[in-house]
Structure formats: C-alpha cells, structure tokens
C-alpha cells in the first residue's frame, strides 16, 4: 500500500512539474503547418528553426531521421564538373575555417588534409585493419575529449536501432491509418465515427476493435485516460522520459511523420474547436508506443556518443597522406592536434564548404553580369505606351524581358498580392479564399457581385454543372451505384479519354470553351466601398482612407509614382495544367496557391477611382486623367497575358491597349521558344514551340507542365535598369526599389518583411524538395496517391508529403534541374542603409548569420558588398 502511495505521490509531483500544453507548443516549432493541397502555399520546412544555424539543423535531422539536407556528392560533383563551383572559393572557405580553429598544427599540413578531404570521390584504403585497430588502442588516450550533444530518440526508435523489432515503422503505419480516417474530406465510403469528439476520443473509442492489433495491445489501450492531456502526461511519466528531454522526445515523434503532424498543426490553427489537435495526435501516438514497447522495458538511458578514434586515424590515412608508422614519430601535442582536426572537419563541415563555394560562385556570376552588361539606351519616359506591374515570381523575368524588347514598354516588379490584405469571394461562391501570403492574416473581405437577375441565372447554370459532378462522385463512392456507373458514364468518358490522350490541345481547349460558354459569367463589380454587415467576421470593402492607403502603398512599393503611361497593366499571375495534384503550387505563391488576378483587379479598380486619385495628389502622386489602369493575368505555363478587367478607356489608353495586343503574340512566341528548350520533350527539334507548350498544359499524362519556380536563386531589390540588360534565365525574383525615395527605409523594411520572406520560403522549399525528395518533397508524381482529399502519399501508407514532386526539381533520374542554393538577396542601396536595415531587423540579421539566406548590396557608387 505504501509503495502504491509513493508511486501516486511521485506521479502527482511529476504532474506539477510541467505544463503539457506549453510542452507541445514548444515542440511544434520543429515542424510547419501543412494546409490542404488544393491551397498549396510554399513555405520553408525550417521556418521555426532559424534560431539555430543551418549546420546545426542538418546535424539534428541526420541523427533523428537519417535525413541529409545538404546537397549530395553527386549533385556537388555535377556542379563542379560544369564549372559552377570555383575551386578558389573552396580554398578560401578552408582557410577561413582553419582561422577559427586555433589548432597546434602546421598550417600547410592542416590545409592539405582539409583540401584532400573535400574531394568528392572516396580514396582507396591501403592498410591492414589489424594494424589500424592496434594503433587505435595505443592512441586511445589521445582521443579528443569533446562533449557530444546526443540526439533524443523515442523508445520505439531506440529499440529499432538496436535491431530488435521494427516497432517505430509499425507505429508509423498505425498512425497513418488513423490520420487518414480522421482527416478524410468525404473521400472514404465510411468515415471515422464520432469525429466531432476530437481525434483522441474518437480513436480511443474504436481502437479496442482494431483487428490489426493483437488482443493484448487492444486490452491495454482500452483503459487509457479519458482526455488527451491526461493521457500524454501519463505516458511521458510512465515511459520515464526525463524532464529535461520531454520536449526533445515529443519533437522526435513529430519528426517521424512531419507531414501528418504538420496537417494536425495546421488544423489546430484554423478553429478553436480543434485547437488541441496536435496534442491529441501526440497523445494517440505516445499511448500506442507505450503499449507496443512494454515487453522491451526498461531500456538503458541514452548516453553521450563517443568519438571513434579508428575513424579519425582512417581519415588521416586517406586525406593526410599518413602511414600507420608515421604516428609513432609525432609528439603528444601533434598527435592530439591531428586527431582534433579530423574530428572537427567532418562530413557536415565539408558539405557546408562545398555549398558555400557553389553559392559564392553564383554570386560572382550575378555580380559580373550586372557590372559588365552595357546598359540599354532607355526610351524616354514620355514615349512609353504602357507600363506593366508584374509579380516578382521568377517566371515573370523572361516574359518581362521579351515584352521590353518588342515595344516602348516599361515593367515593374512587386509582390503578387500587391500589398492587399484581403480575403476574396468570387461570384456565386459561398467560400472565401485568403489571397495573401500565409504569414499574414486578411483584414478585409472583397466580394465579387452582379445584378440579382444575372447572379440568379449564373448560379442556376453553375449549380447544374456542379450537380452533375456531385452526382458522379456520389455514385462513385457508393457501394452499390458504383457498379452501374461504368455503364452510364462509359461512352462519354471513353470519348473524352481518347480525345485528351491523342489530341490534348484541341480537347482541352474545347472542354474549357464549352464550360465557359455554358457558364457565361456576367459583368461583375467588386465590393470596394465599406459595407456595414452584422455577421461577417471581416469588414467587407474599404473606407476612403483605407482605399487611399492601399493604392498609395502599392504604387510606392512598385516604384510607380510619376511619369505614368496612358495604360498601366496590373498583372496577376496563374498557371494552367491538367490532371495535376500540384496545380496550385504553380499559381501565385503570394496568394495562397491561387491566381493573383483578383488582387490585380482590386488594385487597378482602386487606382481608377476619382476620389483616390484626388487624395493621392496630396502625396505628390499625380495620375493623369488620360491614364487608365487595367488588370491582366499572366498564365505562366502558356506565357500568355489575359485581360480580366478593362474599364472604359480614354483615346490614348485605347490606342496603347490595341498596340499591346498586337505585340503580345510575338512576346508569347519568344518566351515559349526560350522556355521549351528547358523542358524535357520527345521532340529534339521543336518546330512549333507554342504548340508544344500548349500540349504540356493540356496533356493529362504530362508530369511536368512547367518548371514552376525551379532554379530560383536570387532576389534582386533595385531599379529595373540595374538588370534590364541581363538575361537572368528566370532564376531571379525582381522587385523594383529606389533608395533615393525611401529616406527612412520604410519601403525596404516592408520588402524584406514580406516579399523577401515569401521568396526565401519558396527557395527553401525547392531546396528541401531537391536534397531530401522523399522526406521534404513528395517523391515521384507518377506513384502518388491523393489521400483523404488533403494531400498526397507514396502508395497507401506513407507520410503526408508536403513538398514538391520529383518532377518539379529533377531533369532526369540522375540529374537535378533545380540547383539547391540558398537565396541570395541583392539590394541596391548605400551601405549605411543596409546597416540601418540590419540593426532594425534582428530576425533578418539572424537568417544571414545562421546561413538561411545570403545578402549582398550594391552601393551608390556601384561597389558590390557581401554581407554573408
């Protein structure tokens, strides 16, 4: 009785020692929220880990998940062979690294060892293993005494590492099954019962009847605590996880399936009803683990990892040109110094130096390109027929370049959501979409509306189309009606299959035109004036002050505040592809995986309002009466510009629009020709690039409709004339900026906080999907399974894969198309402006110091300064 009382007393003390909600919240930083795939938004998988260095995170992930986040040797060797890595930067990197070590070793010896260790190919070993072991015993007392921070593994992972049973793998399979059932978006014939109670309670109610578990496990799981918090607390205590390791322990569980865990985290942030969903996920997982590892307990506590002296000696034999007999000739100090160097200069340091050399080589190429290109003679501003504001997306750079070639046009780069913190509701829809970067929250709602008669007729046509689609899917998922479905739909679907397979361009166009003709969307207006609503969570429309604020901010951010052309085109962007689960990843990254045409129309409409123009004059922004703003959509997969909002035009604006429309086919042709040579195609000499580009977009068997933002590498903030003579190969985000009109640095601060952060997240997602395609990417697109209506898996039992597919970053099985380089930010501004920026933005400074982003600047006299 006294023993039981002591155990209860000990458990009560443990309960008081930590807050389980705080613990889960802290552990969640190791993963990122993952939304539904139909609202794909690019984000860095390491966004909450930037307080650590890139190398520290790389070491942690290798220990915990056996995941490498540095480019592998094959990628590095391929880049080196193609002269994309200059050896001088490798040598400089080694020299700088050695300067920080303070080793009691001749510099020439240390440099020779490091440079040889950087070689891609492994050296052959010419020695006896017995001799090596004997020498290791003799020198064991010289082993570097360096404290090792071991990585906390879960008990199931430790058991698996010991080679006893694959419990961690089995646990993952069970968790995948339960997550799929709980998160199902009406795809399954039978959903998980009692989901409204929450994940933990719904799982606890039915897990005792799971035939995949043996009787003993089902019996154990039947007597778990009633609530998730209680259960997770109990399991951590019963598993005897030390208090100092509890957060690390939960992190290890989250990293085991970061996709499913990330979806639970995202759902927990969407509503108060599911705010503890991640905690429930961990309660389910750790409870199952506890039941599964009972027969293996107790395990020895984890110990510090010891340095293997044999591996250090082996490295000196390989890279230091030392024979076994050479060690006896060294003094104790020299022996310790050599072993210490071999221990410190490990594979992670080598990978870091290789990657930095690759990045510095690219930076040198950008620097040379910008400084050496002869500046084109600028067309006088007075003769500019049209100005175009594009999203900074790297795919707009080739299109802008071709557009500037064909006529007296001027282009600007700015964030694709145009600084509008809005939630959009399209005509006839009951649902809204957050049309802004995912790190921000919408502050206003803009609704697309039509007259009552037009809206009623449009909704009737849309409901008819949707009803057919809904009926088809209901029959497909019903056990009995799906037997009749092939008989009913077979003839029509067979014809569609044949058409889409053999003439995809014509079939795709025909189906799209048929739908557009049937729906016949009427003329619409946007709710830009503030409306008084009772039930709306967000205010609908803007006040006059807000209209002025967002119009003024957008114009200043894109650097268009004077010398207006008769026609100003605000260009949102989107992509078009067929049978593509990742289609939203090709749309605007600044608009939550949707087209940014809606935002473009909102801004163009605001800038046309007479009251807004009148108020803008107070800020010395005078828009001529003859100037009209229109909105267009840049379809990146086709290199087309579609006008989505054209109000009544002045004579000058109409003339400009007609001129633009005569030039757009030429722009498309040149942009298609430039892009098609990069896309893998069966035709080695493509006679009609535009036709082939159209096929890529319409062919439902095409796994790579376009490259998207692959090969993105730089974010250039400066005047357009800085880069207008440069062919940046669609690798650079281009944001207009003139430091002379930004005395207090406010505009630059906003660019860094918004567009630059979005670009960094895009960059690191492409980086992660390239270096770790089956952990941070989504593997091969041809073997993906759309699951639960939420995302994709490989097969039917994998993690929920939240990165980009293999085909988005790889040219072939053996050759990467995307070059995994961390984003280089280049700012055209004086040195003192950059210093002010870094002093006022410690988070950005931390990104630079910790290796998550790179920074260079171009001073007012043209001097290039590297800050990282």
Image: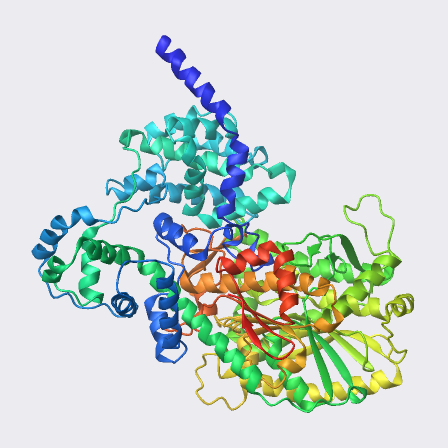
* Residue 54, horizontal then vertical, whole percent: 45, 57
Report which quarter residue 325 is drawn in.
bottom left
Residue at figure coordinates x 32%, y 45% from the top left: 148
Q: Is residue 83 above or below residue 762?
A: below
The coloring applied to the image is: rainbow
Q: Position of residue 90 (x, y in %)?
A: 37, 71
State whether residue 479 appears in this view. no
Residue 588 as seen in the image, left or right of residue 806: right
Residue 467: image quadrant is: bottom right
**On the image, which quarter does residue 736 sit in?**
bottom right
- Given residues 724 and 219, the one toward you in this image is 724
Question: Residue 79, percent across and down?
Answer: 38, 75
Residue 613 in sight here: yes
Residue located 80% across and 70% down the image: 604
Q: Quadrant of the N terminus?
A: top left
Q: Is residue 127 left or right of residue 227?
A: left
Of residues 28 and 637, the one nearer the viewer is 28
For image coordinates 48% across by 34% down, the residue present is: 203
651 left or right of 704? right
In the image, residue 637 lies at what x, y percent? 58, 75
Q: Is residue 620 left or right of residue 116?
A: right
Residue 636 versus residue 322: which sits nearer the camera? Answer: 322
């Amino acid at each position: 009785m006294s023993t039981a009382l002591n155990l209860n007393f000990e458990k009560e003390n443990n309960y008081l020692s930590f807050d389980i909600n705080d613990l889960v919240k802290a552990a969640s930083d190791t993963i990122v929220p993952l939304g539904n795939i139909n609202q794909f938004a690019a984000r860095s998988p390491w966004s909450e880990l930037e307080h650590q260095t890139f190398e520290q995170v790389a070491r942690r992930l290798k220990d915990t998940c056996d995941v490498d986040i540095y480019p592998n040797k094959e990628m590095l060797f391929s880049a080196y062979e193609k002269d994309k890595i200059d050896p001088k930067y490798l040598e400089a990197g080694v020299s700088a690294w050695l300067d920080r070590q303070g080793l009691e070793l001749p510099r020439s010896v240390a440099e020779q060892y490091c440079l040889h260790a950087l070689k891609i190919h492994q050296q052959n070993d010419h020695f006896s293993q017995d001799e090596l072991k004997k020498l290791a015993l003799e020198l064991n007392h010289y082993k570097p005494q360096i404290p090792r921070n071991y990585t906390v593994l879960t008990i199931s992972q430790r058991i698996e590492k010991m080679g006893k049973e694959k419990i961690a793998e089995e646990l993952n399979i069970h968790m995948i099954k339960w997550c799929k059932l709980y998160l199902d978006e009406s795809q399954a014939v039978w959903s998980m019962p009692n989901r409204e109670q929450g994940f933990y309670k719904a799982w606890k109610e039915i897990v005792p009847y799971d035939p995949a578990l043996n009787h003993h496990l089902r019996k154990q799981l039947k007597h778990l605590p009633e609530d998730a918090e209680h259960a997770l607390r109990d399991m951590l205590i019963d598993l005897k996880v030390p208090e100092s390791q509890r957060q690390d322990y939960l992190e290890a569980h989250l990293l085991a399936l970061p996709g499913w865990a990330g979806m639970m985290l995202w759902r927990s942030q969407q509503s108060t009803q599911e705010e503890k969903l991640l905690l429930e996920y961990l309660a389910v997982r750790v409870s199952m683990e506890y039941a599964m590892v009972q027969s293996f307990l107790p395990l020895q506590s984890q110990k510090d990892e010891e340095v293997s002296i044999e591996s250090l000696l082996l490295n000196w034999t390989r890279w230091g040109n030392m024979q076994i007999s050479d060690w006896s000739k060294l003094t104790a100090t020299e022996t310790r110094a050599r072993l210490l160097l071999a221990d410190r200069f490990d594979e992670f340091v080598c990978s870091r130096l290789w990657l930095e050399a690759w990045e510095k080589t690219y930076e040198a190429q950008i620097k040379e390109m910008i400084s050496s290109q002869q500046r084109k003679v600028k067309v006088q501003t007075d003769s500019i027929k049209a100005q175009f504001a594009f999203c900074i997306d790297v795919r707009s750079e080739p299109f802008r370049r071709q557009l500037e070639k064909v006529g007296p046009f001027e282009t600007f780069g700015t964030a694709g959501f145009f600084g509008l913190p809005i939630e959009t509701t399209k005509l006839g829809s009951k649902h809204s979409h957050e049309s802004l970067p995912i790190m921000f929250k919408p502050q206003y709602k803009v609704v697309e509306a039509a007259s009552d008669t037009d809206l009623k007729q449009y909704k009737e046509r849309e409901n008819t189309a949707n009803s057919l689609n809904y009926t088809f899917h209901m029959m497909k998922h019903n056990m009995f009606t799906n037997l009749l479905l092939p008989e009913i739909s077979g003839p029509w679907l067979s014809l569609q299959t044949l058409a889409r397979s053999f003439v995809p361009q014509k079939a795709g166009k025909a189906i799209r035109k048929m739908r557009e003709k049937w729906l016949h969307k009427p003329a619409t207006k946007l709710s830009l004036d503030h409306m008084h609503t009772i039930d709306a969570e967000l205010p609908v429309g803007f006040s006059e002050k807000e209209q002025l604020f967002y119009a003024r901010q957008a114009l200043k951010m894109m650097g268009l505040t004077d010398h207006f052309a008769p026609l100003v085109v605000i260009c949102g962007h989107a992509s078009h592809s067929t049978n593509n689960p990742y289609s939203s990843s090709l749309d605007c990254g600044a608009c939550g995986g949707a087209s940014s045409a809606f935002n473009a129309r909102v801004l163009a409409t605001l800038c046309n309002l007479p009251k807004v123009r009148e108020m803008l004059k107070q800020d010395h922004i005078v828009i001529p009466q003859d100037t009209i703003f229109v909105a267009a959509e840049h379809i990146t997969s086709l290199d087309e510009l579609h006008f989505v909002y054209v109000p009544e035009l002045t004579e000058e604006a109409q003339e400009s629009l007609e001129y633009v429309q005569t030039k757009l086919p030429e722009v498309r042709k040149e942009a298609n020709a430039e892009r098609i040579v990069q896309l893998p195609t069966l035709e080695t000499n493509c006679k009609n690039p535009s036709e082939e580009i159209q096929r890529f977009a319409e062919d439902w068997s095409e796994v790579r409709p376009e490259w998207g933002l692959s090969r993105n590498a730089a974010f250039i903030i400066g005047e357009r004339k800085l880069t207008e003579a440069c062919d940046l190969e669609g690798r650079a985000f281009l944001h207009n900026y003139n430091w002379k009109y930004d005395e207090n640095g406010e505009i630059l601060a906003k660019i860094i906080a918004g567009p630059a952060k979005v670009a960094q997240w895009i960059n690191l997602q492409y980086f992660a999907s390239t270096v770790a395609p089956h952990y941070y990417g989504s593997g091969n697109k041809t073997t993906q399974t759309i699951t639960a209506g939420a995302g994709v898996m490989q097969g039917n039992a994998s993690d929920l894969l939240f990165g980009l597919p293999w085909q988005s970053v790889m040219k072939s099985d053996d050759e990467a198309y995307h070059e995994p380089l961390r984003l280089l930010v280049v700012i055209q501004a004086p040195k003192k402006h950059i210093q002010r920026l870094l002093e006022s933005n410690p988070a950005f400074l931390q990104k630079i110091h910790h290796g998550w982003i790179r920074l260079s600047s171009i001073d007012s006299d043209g001097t290039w300064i590297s800050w990282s």
